[in-house]
Amino acid sequence: LYCLPGNAGIASVAENVSGISVTDVPKIVEWCKENKIDFVCVGPEDPLTKGVVDELDKAGILAFGPTAAAAELEGSKAFV
């Protein structure tokens, strides 16, 4: 189990991943490929609105979270 960015509180149950911003979608996808990650659960709003789920899907990696279009509802407080 890996956690990005992780913190001391989760370190006892997951390996914290550092050196990658949660908004750097291409690096996240690259890291997942390099580490043979087959499922990602995305929590933070920023990577969701930047399309991390969409890009993981394109790379063939299952991801739990809304697409960028769906995340816009939460991410944009001015959505109309």
Image (cartoon, rainbow, N blue to C red):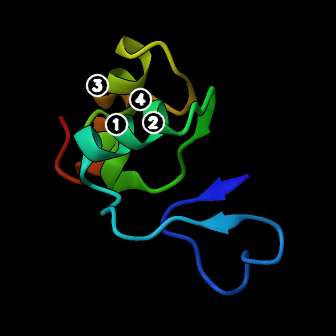
Asked whether the residues under the numbered discs 4 and 1 touch, taking CB atoms below 8 Å apart as contact, a structural biologist would say no
**Percent x, y of residue 67:** 38, 25
- Packing grade of label 2 (10 A; few <14, some 14-19, many >=20) is few
Residue placed farthest to the right in the image?
13
Q: How many other residues sit within 10 Å of disc 3, few (<14), some (14-19) or many (≥20)?
A: some
Residue 60, label in figure: none
Residue 69, percent from left and from top: 28, 25
Q: Which of the marked residues, 4 or 1, is nearer the chain's N terminus?
A: 1
Q: In the current view of this chain or complex, which residue is farthest to the front?
A: 34
Residue 9, quarter of the rendered image: bottom right
Which residue is label 3 attached to?
A: 69
Give residue 70's position: percent from left, percent from top: 37, 27
Q: CA distance from mark 3 to mark 4?
A: 10 Å
Q: Nearer the viewer, residue 16 or 53?
A: 16
In this figure, which residue is indicated by the disc labeled 4? 53
For disc 1, the marked residue is: 30
Q: Are marks 3 and 4 in contact (CB under 8 Å)?
A: no
**53 with respect to 72 (left or right):** right
Q: Are marks 2 and 1 in contact (CB under 8 Å)?
A: yes
User: Could you tell which of marks 3 and 1 lies nearer the N-terminus?
Assistant: 1
Q: Which residue is mark 2?
A: 34
Which tag is nearer the camera, tag 3 or tag 1? 1
Q: Secondary structure at mark 4?
A: helix
C-alpha gap between disc 2 and disc 4: 17 Å
Q: Can you say whether 36 is above or below 27 in the image? A: above
Pointer 4: residues within 10 angstroms few (<14), some, or many (20+)?
many
Q: Residue at x 83, y 68 (%)?
A: 13
Q: Is residue 16 depicted above or below 70 in this figure?
A: below
Q: What's under tag 1, amino acid-wise?
A: Glu
Mark whose residue sits in front, 4 or 1: 1
CA gap, disc 2 to disc 3? 27 Å
How far apart are labels 3 and 1 at the CA level? 22 Å
